[in-house]
Amino acid sequence: MALRPYWSGHIRLSLVTLAVNIYPALSRSRQIPLHEIYRKTGQRVHHQNVVDGEPIENDDIVKGYEVEKGEYVILEPQEIKDLKIPSKRTLDITQFVDADTIDGIYFETPYFVTPDGKGSESAFAVIREALRGAGKIGIGQLAISGRERLCAIKPCGSGIMLETLRYEEEIRKSDPYFGDIPKGSIDKEELSLAKELIKRKSASFKPETFHKEALQELIDSKLEHREAKVIVEDKPGGKVVNLMDALRKSLKEKPATAPKTKAKAKPAPKTKAKKPAARKKVKHGRAA
């Protein structure tokens, strides 16, 4: 079965334009879904679109931008769809930056980018390898669902990765949180020991060795009608520990080995359940 692209259009670098498809890189189906259940009957909780307690139809819902408390500028779906945004069909790369100069707080959602058709494969490969060789990330804007999103493209294996970025105004200033942290002098010996500890525990990141063990174990134990395995929580002590003593003690410990890949458990027998109805959002007198 052919994969359906999330977005199809073009990437343009100056006079070079190539057709591409973009696909979501995240698998929502692999996350652990938790639904709301009515405890007394075990039935799934569903929600309706309501205004003043009265159900309303989806066709009667529009978008609204709140200008004052309870006052909105109404935007019809067709108005948003008809917006003449240059980046609706083309991701125009306007600049290149070093790969390590964008703070992680700006990165939002990853997507896979592939060439759309054989005519784009050659140009696609040239751009991918040029980015890889230069150690650069391309920056541009792309409009999806009527909203322009800041984007970054970078090489990813034989393809290209696109990541949406948060705008500056979407990120809170750190001053209210970090401003009261005292800027005291740092003991050179403590710093040296801390660096040595980091060096000893440094390793390649292997995401496949980490799992959502606690929640999955609880679910598996209920499916298998057994007690959940006890997971011992390592709670820090309440007393103040001397930093130098703690660092020296940490350095004496043997380096931790990478956790073994968790073996896949045999699936438990499925129980029949009623097919859930589509979940709807609750509206409290406001258009969302």
Image (cartoon, rainbow, N blue to C red):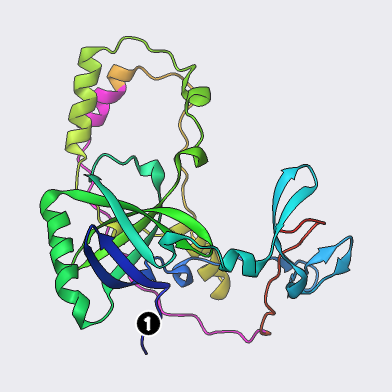
Q: Residues within 10 Å of mark 1 (few under 14, many from 20)?
A: few
- Asked if one can make out residue 228 in the rendered structure from this viewpoint, the answer is no
* Residue shown at the point (27%, 62%) measured from the top left: 12
User: Looking at the picture, how far across and down is residue 116, in whole percent?
Assistant: 28, 78
Q: Which residue is mark 1?
A: 3
Residues 27 and 99: in front is 99
Q: Is residue 87 above or below residue 4?
A: above
* Residue 30 versus residue 102 in the image, above or below: below
Residue at 19% x, 21% y: name it.
Answer: 192
Q: Which residues are magenta?
A: 246-273
How far across and down, in percent of the image, does residue 225 sit? 58, 73
Q: Is residue 270 above or below residue 6?
A: below
Q: From this viewpoint, which residue is outermost toward the bottom?
A: 1
Does residue 81 appear to the left or right of 47 in the view shown?
A: left
Check disc 1 and report its element: helix, strand or loop: loop
* Quadrant including the N terminus: bottom left
Q: Is residue 201 magenta?
A: no
Tell me the quadrant of the picture where the C terminus can be found.
Answer: bottom right
Question: In front: 197, or 218?
Answer: 197
Viewer-closest of 79 and 98: 79
Q: Amino acid at mark 1?
A: Leu
Residue at the limit of the structure toward the left, as seen here: 133
Coordinates of residue 121 in the picture (x, y in percent):
18, 75
Asked if residue 172 can be seen in this view, the reply is yes
Quadrant in the rendering for residue 57: bottom right
Magenta stretch: dominant SS?
A: loop
160 shown above or below 114: above
Residue drawn at (41%, 60%) of the image: 87
The answer to whether residue 196 is left or right of residue 6 is left
